[in-house]
């Protein structure tokens, strides 16, 4: 090689793994629908055709990314439980090792915990079955570990706490707050330890009653109700205006008399859920005498709104769509709502840095959001109270 020869660009030893890791990161940040093969290629510094040498299409990349996350989940569980084999059943180090492994995974690969839950609709039935079977098997092992020395914890309760721990581990990918790895690990460890100590069987029934906020009014709210249900069941991108119209007994074009576009419908769904959250927050504040009581009532109110209709879940799960349009007022209202929780956590614990309070709040919210996304026992009347109790446990209430 002479001084005039161009530099040689060498292919990474494992280009396929690099593409999977970058795809997982981009899918986690933007959502599957908002990432193209060209985006992944650009992040890897290669051309689009280079990606197709390894993967047939974008869906194959998603499947590989999700399964890589399951591989990580299984590996971290194997390491933790293998180390615990020589410990006495009552030794707290058995559970400590598992919690540490979960936290490490949550910091190093948060997408391993959440990528499937947010993008499973884009996988085939066979792929979803494989992911569900393997993930459920891992969490069953976590649940059995949680039951050691706890005669009070039945199988359902243990599985519920295992899923909550996974939600906390993945919650770091759901917000922009960043703290040093050691502090993040310590905070996640505390939050997971808090939630696995909860006895969900003791949760009181949450009296949901009437939803806070304005009363439904006419055809416009009928369209929002039908759209919310369709978006929640099938995904925003898979629902057409004609289907929305059919659901309320009108033609597709007639929908445009009430909304300018499908995105406008989604924005209105988000605005309606935000109004309900704000009304619930105002009622909680009026009924509370202390920050502790206010935050507890906020948790109850959030779960009430989340479980009563699909609106809040639909708005949350389609946040990338809302960020692409002029929905600044809605996004500002959502951030202000979460900011109120963070301020209350700081008021209750004045020595806690604000960034760690934010991590705590997002972990608590993720437990409820993920449970509704995964549809785990959503029709059980005791579920809202159990979700609220786990959220309060994470918040230290």
Image: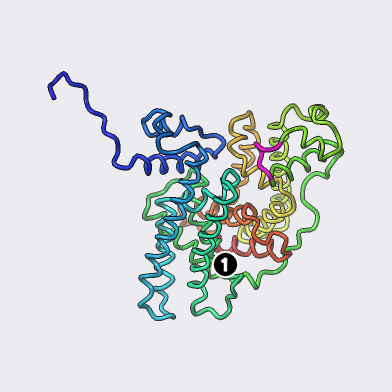
Left or right: where 218 falls relative to 334 = right
98 vs 361: above or below = below
Residue 32, image quadrant:
top right
Q: Point out residue 80 in the picture as x, y percentages from the top left corner.
A: 39, 66
Q: Report the residue at 59% width, 73% height from top.
A: 155
Residue density around tag 1, few if under 14, some if 14–19, many if 20 or more, within 10 Å: many
Could one spot residue 354 in this view of the protein? no
Q: Residue at x 58, y 43 (%)?
A: 122
The residue tagged with tag 1: helix, strand or loop? Answer: helix
Q: Residue 238 magenta-drawn?
A: yes
Where residue 339 appears, x then y in whole percent? 58, 46
Query: Of residues 329 and 218, which is closer to you in this image?
Result: 218
The chosen color scheme is: rainbow
Query: Magenta region: which residues?
Result: 234-239
Front residue (pair 275, 156):
156
Q: Position of residue 140 (x, y in %)?
A: 52, 67
Query: Residue 221 lies in magenta, yes or no?
Result: no
Residue on which disc 1 sits? 159
Query: Is residue 126 visible from the viewing direction of this image?
Result: yes
Q: Residue 198: give x, y in percent of width and height.
A: 57, 69
Quadrant in the picture for the N terminus = top left
Q: Nearer the viewer, residue 5 or 84?
A: 5
Quarter of the picture holding the C terminus: bottom right
User: What residue is shown at x 47% (from left), y 48% (from top)?
Assistant: 111
């Amino acid at each position: 090689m002479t001084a005039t020869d161009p530099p040689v660009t060498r292919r990474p030893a494992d280009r396929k793994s690099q593409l999977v890791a970058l795809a997982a990161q981009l899918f986690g940040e933007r959502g599957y629908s908002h990432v193209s093969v060209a985006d992944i290629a650009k992040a890897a510094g290669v051309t689009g055709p280079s990606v197709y040498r390894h993967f047939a299409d974008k869906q194959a990349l998603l499947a590989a990314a999700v399964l890589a996350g399951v591989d990580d989940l299984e590996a971290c569980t194997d390491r933790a439980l293998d180390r615990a084999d020589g410990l006495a059943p009552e030794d707290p180090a058995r559970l400590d090792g598992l919690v540490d492994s979960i936290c490490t995974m949550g910091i190093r690969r948060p997408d391993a915990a959440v990528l499937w839950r947010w993008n499973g609709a884009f996988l085939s039935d066979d792929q979803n079955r494989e992911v569900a079977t393997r993930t459920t098997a891992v969490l069953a092992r976590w649940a059995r570990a949680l039951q050691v020395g706890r005669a009070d914890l039945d199988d359902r309760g243990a599985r519920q706490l295992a899923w909550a721990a996974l939600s906390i581990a993945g919650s770091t990918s759901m917000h922009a707050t960043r703290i040093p790895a050691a502090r993040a690990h310590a905070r996640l460890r505390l939050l997971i330890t808090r939630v696995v100590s909860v006895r969900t069987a003791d949760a009181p029934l949450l009296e949901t009653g009437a939803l806070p906020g304005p009363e439904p009014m006419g055809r416009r709210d009928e369209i929002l109700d039908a759209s919310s249900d369709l978006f929640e069941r099938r995904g925003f991108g898979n629902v057409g205006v004609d289907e929305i119209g059919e659901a309320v007994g009108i033609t597709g074009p007639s929908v445009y008399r009430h909304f300018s576009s499908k995105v406008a419908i989604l924005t209105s769904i988000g605005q309606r859920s935000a109004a309900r959250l704000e009304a619930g927050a105002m009622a909680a504040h009026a009924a509370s005498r202390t920050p502790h009581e206010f935050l507890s009532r906020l948790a109850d109110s959030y779960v009430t709104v989340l479980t009563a209709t699909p609106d809040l879940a639909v708005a949350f799960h389609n946040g990338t769509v809302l960020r692409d349009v002029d929905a600044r007022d809605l996004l500002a209202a959502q951030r202000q709502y979460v900011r109120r929780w963070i301020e209350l956590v700081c008021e209750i614990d004045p020595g806690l840095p604000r960034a760690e309070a934010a991590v705590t709040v997002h972990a608590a919210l993720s437990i409820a959001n993920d449970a509704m996304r995964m549809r785990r026992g959503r029709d059980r009347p005791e579920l809202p109270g159990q979700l609220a109790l786990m959220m309060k446990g994470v918040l230290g209430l």
